[in-house]
Amino acid sequence: MRRRVRWRYGLVGVGLVGILAITAVAFPGFTRFFHRRSRPSLAGLATATVGRSDLWVTVTASGLVGSAEQTVIECELQSLHAGVNGQRMTTSGASTILKVIPAGSTVKKGDVLCELDSSDYVELVRQQQMTVERAKADQLQARLANEVAQESLREYREGLLTQNLKQLDGRIALSQTELERLSDRLRWSRRMLAKGYASLGQVSADAVAERRAEFNLSQSRMSYDLFKRYEVPGTLRQLENAITTTGTTLKYQTDRLERHTERLESYQRQVEHCTIRAPHDGFVIYAEDPRRQFVIEPGLEVRQSQPLFYLPDLARMEVTTLLHESVVNQVKEGMRAKVRVESLPNHTLEGHVVSVASLPTRNFFSEVTYYVGLVKIDHIPRGLRPGMSAAVQIGTSHRSDVLTIPSEAMTVEDGQEVCYVAEGDTLERREVKTGQSSQDRLEVTEGLSEGERVVLDPSNIDPGIVAESSTPAAPDADETPDSDVTR
């Protein structure tokens, strides 16, 4: 009984479908009337008004935050060969990392970045300090010898020489006086001989004494002349030569001390280089090379001039951006730019273009050509770090009082720029021409008038609300000529 009821209703449904189909073919106006009565409204579509405004033309590109000045911190240890106490000591210029600061740390000038094993250099410093002390003793002894030589010369010139000259002068004076006395006695003896009061022997003795006094006087004068002519210059030269010799020795010992002191200071600097400090404020980046399995960590042996860290200056940040070849000619140095960093969503940074590469950057994996542009950030916010991704918007030109629409109101259909204009309960498909564009606005040069309303998202438009005259559609089945139907 139930099967019959279902069959009865099934026949009724088939009949109704057939009636509707025949009605649609025989009375096409009925279907159009039904379609108009069920056409959706514009209530669900967002629109915007076409208006005039100032248009800031921009170029948008992605970029990477970096520092305009980045310091490469290397291992400054040196390979040294030194002779200490007759023994040869050698350092290889390599050491082992004992401690290292974590990557990504923010540091101040003077903060410790890394500590290296300094035991070899500390021993070298200790041995060199003993060498310096010995050199100081030798230099002090040479200085004393030179001072003694200078004092000896001064003593001779100001004391001994004057004393000797006076002694010689006195000896000459005494000889002269003795000669005069003996000459007077000889003359008296001769007078007494003539008077018979003196003997001839006494006269002869007085004559011998006078000649002896003359000889003594001549010897004194000769000694004086020899002393002044030969002994004085010779003694002065000996004393001056002693000064020169001791002075040369002093200079040698002084140079030797300076040389050993400089070497000690260089060894001490090597000990200081085992504690690597930040030369300025910055952000620590390890100079690692995963391809060579070079990873900065305690226990790693590092060598001379090997890069260990990169220290970007956080006070001088910039964005390296890639400009497509189609827009690179629009970007010039000095243009203002806005930078949005993904890690700092609440900040819009101000900057300006500082350079644009004249040669493109080639990529073997793509045929697209880009040019590198640098945008300097004017004010550095807290938290900005090298390596962060950024979007750069560069203002290239300014258009004042032009007709504009939101960028999302324009679509492209069959290669033609199209907008949909709201008129009452229908939409009109309007072909337009555009000019310059900003990030969110388009300049319209033809096809729209000020005050008209355009749909913001044409992809959500129901074709049923588009005016029939504005969009040529394919012929409907009810409008096909009879001959075509017959065929």
Image (spheres, rainbow, N blue to C red):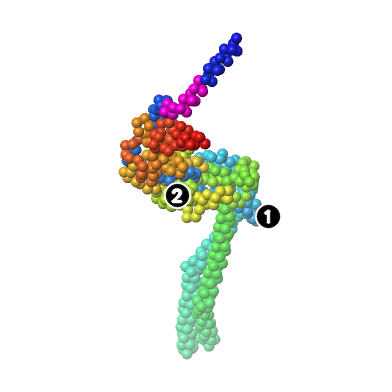
Q: Is residue 437 left or right of residue 100?
A: left
Q: Nearer the viewer, residue 65 or 473?
A: 473
Instruction: Please name the amino acid that badge 1 sits on.
Output: Gln
Q: Nearer the viewer, residue 259 or 229?
A: 259
Does the stretch in magenta take in 207? no
Q: Earlier in the sequence, mark 1 or mark 2?
A: 1
**Label 2 residue SS:** loop
Q: Is residue 141 left or right of residue 401?
A: right
Does the stretch in magenta take in 21? yes
Percent from the top left, x then y, of residue 78?
Answer: 60, 53
**Label 1 residue SS:** strand
Q: Which residue is mark 1?
A: 87
Quadrant housing residue 80: bottom right
Q: Which residue is mark 2?
A: 327
Quick one: which residue is furthest to the right in this view?
Answer: 87
Identify the residue at horizontal 47%, vertical 67% (top origin). 158
Tell me the magenta residue range: 16-31
Percent from the top left, x then y, of residue 285?
Answer: 55, 43
Q: Tell me if mark 1 has few (under 14), some (14-19) or many (20+) residues whose alpha carbon lies within 10 angstroms of its own.
A: few
